[in-house]
Amino acid sequence: MSDILRLTDVQVRIAGSHILQGIDFTVPEGGVTALLGRNGVGKTTTLKAILGIVPATGNIEFDGHRIDEAPTHRIVRSGVGYVPEDRDVFASLTVEENLRLAEVPGVQPDYATVHDLFPELRDRRKQRAGTLSGGQQQMVALARVLLGPARLLLVDEPTKGLAPKLVAQVGDVLARVAERTTVLLVEQNLPLVRRIADAAVVIDNGRVVHTSDAASLLGDESLVNSLLGVADASRAGTESTSVEHAARHEPPPSMTATSEIGGTG
Amino acid sequence: MTDLAQALTDRAISATGSPRRGRPPAGRILTVLVPLAVLALLIFLPWMGFSIPGVLPGAVNSPGSMQLLALCLVAGGIALSYDILFGRTGLLSFGHALFVGAGAYSAAIALGEWGGGLGLAVLVVIAMGIALPLIVGAVALRVKGIAFAMVTLAFAQAVAITVLRNPAGMTGGEEGLSLNRSQLPAVLSGVVNAPYRYWLALGFCLLCFLVVAWLTAARTGHAWAAVRENEARVEVLGLSSYRAKLTAVVVGGFLGTLGGFVQLIVIGGANPHLLSTEFTLSLLIMVVLGGAGSRWGAIIGGVLYVLLDNRLQELSTSQTIAELPAVLRVPLGQPVFVLGLLFVLVVYFAPGGIAAIGGRVRGWWRRRRQSGVTPT
Amino acid sequence: MSSLILILVTGVGLGALYFLVASGLSLIYGLMHVLNFAHGAFLTAGAYAAWVAAASLSSLGGWSFPAAVLIGMFVGALIGAAVEFFLIRPLYRRHIEQVLVTVGLGLMGVALITGIWGADPQPFPRPAWTTATTTIGGAAIPNDRFLLIGAAAVLLIGLLLLLKYTRLGLIIRAGVENRTMVQALGIDVRRTFTLVFALGGAAAALGGVLGSVYSGSVSPGQGTALLIYAFIVVVIGGFGSIGGTALAALVVGLVQQLANYYLYSGIGDVSVVLLLALVLLVRPGGLTGRTA
């Protein structure tokens, strides 16, 4: 199995901060690779560097070709899909328009898979995306990248702020998607990661500090604690601050109210 | 649009370097000695008879040259007053001409229509220079960024339009007002007294420089720089960004109003151009040309702009231009075209302005010394 | 009563003119965050191009005017696209410098036109029917107002259709909201930028030509005054919102005419400016709330 993505000494400086200080890792083709780490270590920045959204130095290879100098749109066209943190759906456009925007001219969009995975989106297609709930917006963000022939999906904290039922649903979608596409997943929800991830890469202070398969990392409680600051991975909660709360043995605050009652965004 | 000035200023400052950090004592003495020497030269200029052909219309102390240099220095001072807002505090204002024009017109009216003396005129200008920026600032600073720029534009346009309509015959409409010299000290009037107007302009420019240097080194200046860099952080640090910005508007506006008064004396009249958007844009060009936010940038930009404008006017009617093919003659015959082109080129290739070029040369020189090529 | 009708129609007509010029500015700033100070130069260049064309095409008789208008718009589009492609695009992500370059270009453009054709206004050959009047409700209204209103209405409808039903419009609407995400969907927004500049240039040129019909002359400075009004309209209406720009243009035109007539001749301009300050102080994001 070859590596679909390879990062070598990737560094990012923003406004004087040396956020990524030399990232090295590879993503094998197929399955889910989880990108883990405490808050603020540079996980999202790594994804943005791969896409060229932030300026970076170093070597980034996708499918054997260097992409570190390429413009964002061309990287995406070559087969990299992006599901950003906070979804970034276009609030003033309808669901249908959000999806249409993601269509690649000349390529038949795969609406069959999208409607199969997210039947709710077909019912809401004329609805303005800004009036959707958080969970529904996440569906749109995921559906967008599944319309085209993406070979690598960069997914950033898709379960942030979602109720447990939706977290499970997102997990199912990602697992199904990973059957035919490689997924690089940034996540704080460790049970989810344990369920669907094959490999794990841990970042700390702008560098990669650990790579292994997911099972052996997450099964080792003391290792998880030292790398991610979590006392017990299996008891981690379902929201973005799950890591801190789990470490303090506090019950996670309920996020269902905000994510389901219509009209967040 | 605070980031508008921020990046320019950062580049200018990093290029010019801070004279207080890491420079050898010899360098530090130079930064004080050289300006003092230049100042001495400028003060004694009216007694010198040398010529700079092509740059000045005659000998340095001829009335024509003195007049031109006076205009240059006033422009330098006014540009510096604009830089307080734009380069130091990151406030993009399209209404600075309002202050300059207000200074010129109010003084002209005080001396002319009201028949007052120099004392009255000075009082009127000072009052105008404090009240007007306070009012404009209080209103405009309620919004930020582009909205702020547009409100300043709105104020300036409103006054410019009103003045052009010549309400109650007070402003002279399109022709403006000429200066009533009867109430001024005789030493400021007449062709032969051009050196005295030159010294007035020099004094004004020096005043602006000293005010800016003093305030920038004080807490006020640090607040300005902080607002320019990151306004949100200023609030977190417990400083009031509104107060810092208002101070910038008032100080810059006051000096601008004063500049209008000096301009009135130097050119002998107030005209609507001083209130126009074109005038504010020319200030923007001066500041960017010279280097926004740097110590000398605005002055250099102002002097250079007026000099170039004047020389290009001369050139446009000269023989050399008339002989050029139309393709070159037409654009070069328009001073604004050449200045605009120069401005665009500076923006593209030297964003820190001329001051930054000086800094780059200094940096190159320092690197040569450090690499041991020349013993220190 | 008849004078009121004339004032109202003239106000709407002026609003139409402001909309023609402001629509491009609104899209350009909304999508690219560039405050295009060269817009006045596009306007003036289009007017002069139409003026030159009308003179050379006088043999076409009644068709010379529409042909001149189209030529003017084409020149405006070309200049807009060229400015974006050669001068703005290389400064991608450097918003500061982009704005400054447009300032410089605006000044250079006006100076160049002054150099070629002189600073004095030249009479613009407007078709006879534009100076003729139509009587409505007892008021004799010059037809140039209807021309302006008609052109603006066509542009407004055209733009709304473009935005709602075409892929380009979809990209523009999405880009105004979040340019980076559009890139992250694999779309090269830079091409859209050039198109938007071309569109803006054409609309500005149309405004310039019709403005010359209204005033009866072309002059190098005609763009500068109109540009300031266009900026005011865009800020009041909210950047990136075509509907907001249209509404603001209408309000500005009406306020200007009504104030001039009912209050004091000449105060119309000042009223507009005060209106801007008022709107901004109450709603910094403009009427439609789109923050600058």
Image (tube, coloured by chain):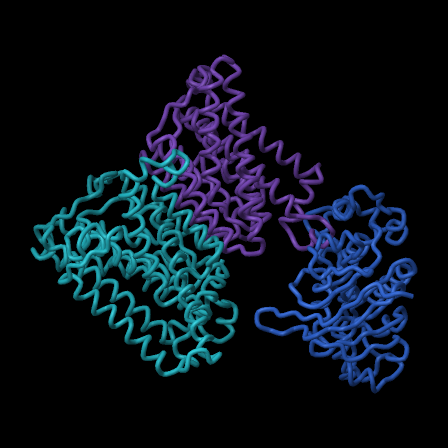
Asked if one can make out residue B134 in the rendered structure from this viewpoint, the answer is no
Residue B79 vs residue B64: left or right? right
The front one of C48 and A112 is: C48
How many marks can you see?
Answer: 0
For the view shown, which residue lies furthest in the front direction? B373
Where's residue A87, x and y in %? Answer: 73, 59
Locate residue C171 relative to residue B225 in the image: left or right.
right
Percent coordinates x, y for residue A124 in the rendering: 80, 47
Q: Nearer the viewer, residue A247 or C126?
A: C126
The chain shown in blue is which? A
Taking depth in this image into account, of A178 and B320 the one nearest to the observer is B320
Q: Is residue B364 above or below residue B347?
A: below
Residue placed at 45% from the left, 39% from the top? C40
Residue B302, image x, y percentages: 32, 56
Q: Is residue A229 in sight in this rendering?
A: yes
Report the side of B27 relative to A121 (left or right).
left
Depicted C126 relative to depicted B253: above or below:
above
* In this picture, residue A193 sits left or right of residue C155: right
- The quarter of the picture where residue B355 lies is bottom left
Q: Would you identify the image quadrant in which residue C218 lies?
A: top left
Chain shown in purple: C
Colour assignment, chain B: cyan
Q: Where's the N terminus of chain C, which quadrant?
A: top left
